[in-house]
Image (spheres, grey):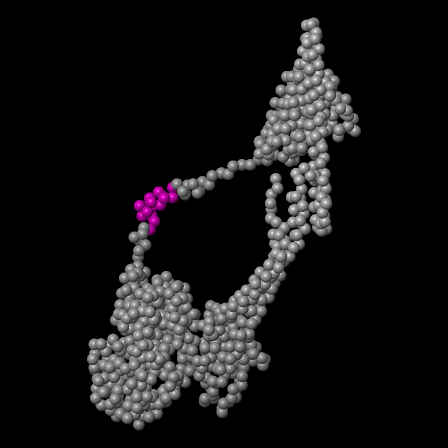
Amino acid sequence: MIVVKGTLKQRLGAWLLAAFGVLGTFLLIEAYTSAERAADRAYDSLLQAASLTIGEAIQWQGGQPVVEIPAAAFQMLATEQQERVFYTVLNSDGQSVTGNLDTTILETLHHQASRQSEPVWSFLQYAGAPIRVYGRQLKSAGWESVEPLQIWVGHTLSGRESLTQDLFTKALIRFVVMVMLTGLLMLVAIRTALGPVRRLRQLIRQRKADDVSPLNAEVPGELYDMAETLNALFERQREGRNALLRFSADASHQLKTPLAGLQSTSELALQSNQPEDWRQALQTVHDSSARTSRLAGQLLSLSRLRHAEAGSKTQIDLSDLLRETITDWADRDIAKHHDLGMAALPDAPIYIQGEPWSLYELIGNLIDNALRYTPDGSEITLGLTRQENTAELRIQDNGPGVNPELLDRLHQPFERGGRQDTEAPGSAWLSSTPLCNGIRQRSKFTASRATACAYASYSQSWPRKPDMKRWLWTHFSAPVITLLLAAGLLPSAAMAQNKTTLEVDAALDLPVVAPLLAAFEQAHPEIEVSFQDRSTLEVDERARNASPAPDVVISSAMPWQMARVNDGLAQPLDSSAAREWPSWAKWRNEVFGFTFEPIVTVYRLDLARHMLPPQTHADLHTILNTHKDMLRGRVTTYSPSGSGIGYTLFQQDARYSPRFWDLVAALGAADVHLENSTQKMLEGLTDGRYWVGYNLLGSYAIQWARSHPEIIVQIPQDYSLVMMRMAFIHRDAPNPEAARTFMNFLLSADGQQILAGETPLFSVLPDVVGPYTSQRLRDQVGERLYPIPIDASLLAFVDPMRRDVFMSRWRREIQILNP
């Protein structure tokens, strides 16, 4: 049977694809390394630019270097991929002037940069992540001293990896397109190259069924052997057909001769009136009929053998078959004058795959030939031996044997002793030869006058044992578990419903956020929220040092929150709510701004009786100057040293308005009172101690004004800062699953709806409906809203030296106009 195993097209295509695959692998490896080098060059240039920006900000005061880190440097270091940012400025002794990079990991690189004039690049493992650092040494001069400084900047590698992937993906797309085009060309080439094969196939299909003449065609050299093989096959077909015709003629002749003898004998007997002639004629007819019947039986067996199916083979014990066959033949009359015996058989059974009837017929024919062509009294012995992978069947006799020159001719039909025999008494040998040939072809037998051998392979297989463990588990696991539950040896569902306590450290008044917490606990009764309201600086300190750490950290001190995330204290939130959150209100999917709170000016109605209330920052500066005596001691704002949110707001004011320091001086001249919370300022405004408050949180002020009609909340008309409370899951959160559930609720439409409808915190999502939404605030105020961006620029405002420089100027400016 011909089994189709692929096609030439497939094989050629497979080899070509394999070649393309090997070559393509090297090309893709080279493309990836090239993409890495290109990404490194691009991002290394950003490190260089950030280093130059920081270097330009270095100044000398009192013989010491002072640097006010520009926010733009952090933006360049963070890149669009929101990298974690690391930097430090080292003096000539290797001591840190400012920065957040641990100098201990730079000791070797510091000495290397000191010894050479070239910049130093390196990949390091720092704060739980691989980073790329760049350092250079520069000479910086002041009035008092001139000494070299080193600037080191670095960031994480996600941007490089992303750019590498983008470049590699584009290269991969080009490669795939090239492979597809090459594949199309390859298909055309293969089809053209296989044209001679199709023509040869067509030539063979057009031949008649009985046409076995040689092919006459022009073929390429690769197909010459195939054409020659086909011609050889046709030659064998011609020989086979001729042999079949000859066999049919010989068989007809063999059958015709005894039948003619029967006819002539019966005619002679009919003409005679003597009973003795009749008896002799009947005996002749009987013997001739027996030979004819045997010949017909052999031809029938040959036909059966040729048309037998391969699946008819069964497992046979060759020893038992040989024993049964010899026993059967020993009882026949033809064997009475011979010594028919059997050699010692192997102790163990010998199993083979075969057809019992054909093997029985084969052994019987060999015994019959030996009995007929050996003289009376001859010894005929059959034996069976086991080989390594075969079994050998052997029959021997001590008869006259066969001339070796005639052995090959004995396999021809109706051949005996080298001549045609049609009437010899031993015609049974002649008629059995075709059957022996057929069995020999199917069973790989060889036979001769003296020896006959049979070869067959045998095998043994064992049934698989049942999987008792699986059976026991399937049948007994359910009742056993039920019994254990009933006995109390396994925890039940009721026992597993203990509440999880979620620790939340927040700079957020509990009365304001209470509706949100209540809704969360109602939606998730398995979680109990332990909400701790603290100051912004307390929240930051606990995020850095508390043990155990809080699960969720919430604060309005945006730079401090960003610094903790940059330090690696946050874990990413991988959820649909986090991925869909506005990009301007999150960083690295680790910290999220979930409120949108305007910064406002608040004043008492008493102020309006004496002066025009301030609507802009310039108005506030004006009334502080023109009504200084009336407002002395009656103005309040945040303390930049005691409040993280206050420091953040003043930094942002200084960033947006060059006249901010004039306003600070005017506040100082009015003997401003500095508070650490909006609550304290609102209480002072209510009891009349203060008339005007600057930079208060609008969320608290709006809620307070509802119950205190003497308080007026004014959103500045020139520009209004917007603060976002930032929340993140602590890296070491004891209950991370509960923390993720809480964060997802904060960012969900349900959570934002509660913020917009039941709290004055203002929701971030634009499609939420309620009185306190970011979109409604934008509609009312317009483009004058300036949300504090959640990006790496916030890190500049917690730089220790920049903070010291800012606070020094604050103290100087706030005293400058005091009498």
Residue furthest out toward the bottom: 819
Q: Nearer the viewer, residue 151 or 243?
A: 243
Which residue is painted at 67% across and 11% down in the image? 282
Q: Nearer the viewer, residue 294 or 524?
A: 294
* 479 magenta-colored: yes
**Residue 158 appearing in the image:** yes
* 207 magenta-colored: no
Q: Quadrant of residue 604?
A: bottom left
Which residue is painted at 51% across and 70% down in the image? 163
- Locate residue 257, reporting x and y percent: 71, 20
Q: Which residues are magenta?
A: 476-491
Which residue is painted at 72% across and 47% down in the image? 217
Q: Tell whether 518 sits left or right of 450.
A: left
- Locate residue 338, reporting x and y percent: 70, 17
**Residue 354 appearing in the image:** no
Residue furthest out toward the top: 274
Answer above or below: position of 633 versus 461: below
Q: Quadrant of residue 773?
A: bottom left
Please identify the dominant SS of the magenta region.
helix
Q: Quadrant of residue 418?
A: top right
Answer above or below: position of 817 versus 557: below
The quarter in which the N terminus is drawn is top right
- Locate residue 644, reporting x and y percent: 35, 78
